[in-house]
Image (spheres, rainbow, N blue to C red):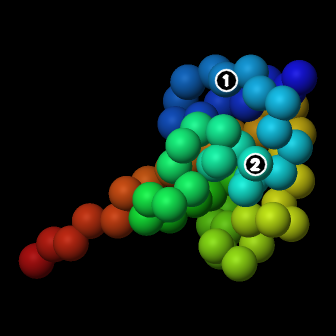
């Protein structure tokens, strides 16, 4: 089990990849911009993005503005 910080909240998880974390959290089908340790991760890279204890994940909902 690893400890992550997701949107400022500590989270313990079995997920080893970003895609596994998003599935575990039930947000895989929602539109988010995702950053791991302050680096944007493209949707195509979710399967390859390995997570480590202490990683900081930010899930940001895109907003339209004007």
Q: Note whether residue 37 is visible.
A: no
Name above or below for residue 43 compared with residue 31.
below
Image quadrant of residue 2? top right
* Count of numbered labels shown in the rendering: 2
Residue bearing the label numbered 2: 20
Q: Is residue 40 left or right of residue 14?
A: left
Report the residue at 77% width, 27% height from top. Answer: 13
User: Looking at the figure, which quarter contains the C terminus?
Assistant: bottom left
Report the residue at 74% width, 21% height from top. Answer: 12
Name above or below for residue 48 compared with residue 14.
below
What percent of the width, then of the height, locates residue 34? 57, 59
Q: Nearer the viewer, residue 48 or 28?
A: 28
Q: Note whether residue 51 is visible.
A: yes
Name above or below for residue 30 compared with residue 54.
below
Q: Secondary structure at mark 1?
A: strand
Report the residue at 26% width, 65% height from top. Answer: 63
What percent of the width, then of the height, locates residue 11? 67, 23
Crowding at mark 1 (Cα within 10 Å: few <14, some 14-19, many 20+): few
Q: Nearer the viewer, residue 13 or 38?
A: 13
Q: Is residue 7 left or right of residue 50?
A: left
User: Looking at the figure, which quarter contains the N terminus?
Assistant: top right
Image quadrant of residue 30? bottom left
Report the residue at 71% width, 78% height from top. Answer: 44
Q: Is residue 15 left or right of residue 39?
A: right
Mark 2–mark 1 Cα distance, whole angstroms, equals 14 Å
Cβ atoms under marks 2 and 1 closer than 8 Å = no
Task: Answer with mark 2 or mark 1, whichever residue precedes in sequence.
Answer: 1
Q: Residue 11: which numbered mark, if any?
A: 1
What percent of the width, then of the height, locates residue 22? 63, 48
What percent of the width, then of the height, locates residue 31? 43, 64
């Amino acid at each position: 089990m690893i400890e992550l910080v997701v949107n400022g909240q500590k989270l313990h998880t079995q997920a080893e990849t970003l895609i596994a974390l998003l599935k575990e959290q039930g947000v895989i089908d929602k539109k988010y911009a995702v950053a791991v340790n302050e680096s944007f991760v493209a949707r195509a890279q979710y399967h390859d993005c390995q997570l480590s204890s202490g990683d900081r994940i930010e899930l940001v909902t895109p907003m339209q503005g004007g």
